[in-house]
Image (cartoon, rainbow, N blue to C red):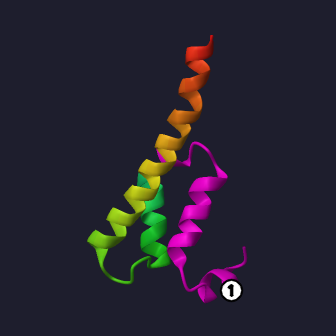
Amino acid sequence: MSFVAVRLCCERLKLLETCIRCKPVAYRNTQRLLQLAHKLRVCRRDKRLQEGQVLVHIAEAALEVQLNICPLQFES
């Protein structure tokens, strides 16, 4: 995605969500994702809301990965 496309994007939280979904282990880089959210100005200037929403997306991604791994462990 180009720089211009990012600047013109209305919902920057969706950009962050796309980053998390593209790489299955992205949830492990919590600090990097929080920094990206800050640079993208997700939720404007409300830092608490920004961190909360980003952490929720990270937790959902981590849970998805765990749910995909656990059935494989029980089948063996």
Q: Is residue 19 magenta?
A: yes
Q: Determine if residue 29 is in view.
A: no
Q: Determine if residue 46 is in view.
A: yes
Dot 1: few (<14), some (14–19), or many (≥20) neighbours within 10 Å?
A: few
Q: Is residue 13 magenta?
A: yes
When asked about the image quadrant of residue 25, the answer is: top right
7 lies left or right of 42: right
Main SS class of the magenta portion in the image? helix
Residue occupying image coordinates x 58% and y 70% = 15
Q: Please, is residue 76 above or below residue 25 in the view?
A: above
64 lies left or right of 43: right
Quarter the C terminus occupies? top right
Q: Which residues are magenta?
A: 1-29
Residue occupying image coordinates x 34% and y 64% = 51
Between residues 3 and 71, which one lies in front from this camera angle? 71
Judged from the image, the secondary structure of the residue bearing numbered disc 1 is helix
31 lies left or right of 48: right
Between residues 51 and 57, which one lies in front from this camera angle? 57
Residue 73 x/y as whole percent: 57, 18
Residue 66 x/y as whole percent: 51, 34
When asked about the image quadrant of residue 17, the answer is: bottom right
Q: The disc labelled 1 sits on which kind of residue?
A: Val
The residue wearing badge 1 is 4
Residue occupying image coordinates x 38% and y 57% = 55
Quarter the N terminus occupies? bottom right
**Farthest left residue in view:** 48
Residue 23 x/y as whole percent: 64, 49
Residue occupying image coordinates x 38% and y 83% = 44
Q: Please, is residue 44 above or below residue 35 in the view?
A: below
